[in-house]
């Protein structure tokens, strides 16, 4: 999120992800409200996302969380678990 304009550009994370060393945890903050965006972030090497505004605005935040988490393809989750990125 651009703190001057409050505009969100998820592409910023995608552009910067390639500059982050693979032994670092990459967290993307702001702008997540759709499953497709979460999958795109994971494919770019993001390990965690921050979801705020979408949860506050949601009438059923628990459903939004399930949508964001539950629809990520199992093979992608297994692939990410198998790499050496992040703690653990």
Image (cartoon, rainbow, N blue to C red):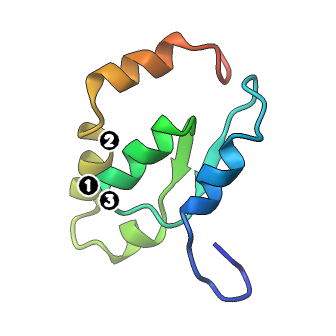
* Residue 72 located left or right of residue 45: left
Residue at the image point whose x is 68% and y is 21% from the top: 87
* Callout in the foreground (3, 2): 3
Q: Count residues near mark 2 (Cα–Cα under 10 Å), then give few for <14, some for 14-19, many for 20+.
A: few
Measured Cα–Cα span from mark 1 to mark 2: 11 Å
Where 28 sits versus 26, above or below? Answer: below
Residue at mark 2: 69
Residue 65 versus residue 48 in the image, above or below: below
Asked whether the residues under the numbered discs 1 and 2 touch, taking CB atoms below 8 Å apart as contact, a structural biologist would say no
Q: What element carries label 3?
A: loop
Residue at the spot of label 3: 34
At 57% from the left and 14% from the top, the residue drawn is 83
Label 1: element kind = helix
The image quadrant of residue 13 is bottom right
Q: Could you say which is closer to the camera, residue 59 or residue 68?
A: 68
Q: Mark 1 points at which residue?
A: 62
């Amino acid at each position: 999120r651009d703190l001057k304009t409050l505009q969100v550009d998820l592409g910023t994370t995608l552009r910067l992800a390639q500059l982050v060393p693979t032994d670092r945890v990459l967290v993307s903050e702001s702008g997540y409200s759709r499953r497709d965006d979460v999958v795109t972030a994971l494919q770019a090497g993001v390990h965690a996302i921050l979801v705020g505004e979408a949860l506050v605005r949601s009438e059923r935040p628990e459903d939004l969380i399930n949508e964001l988490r539950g629809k990520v393809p199992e093979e992608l989750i297994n692939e990410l678990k198998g790499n050496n990125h992040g703690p653990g």
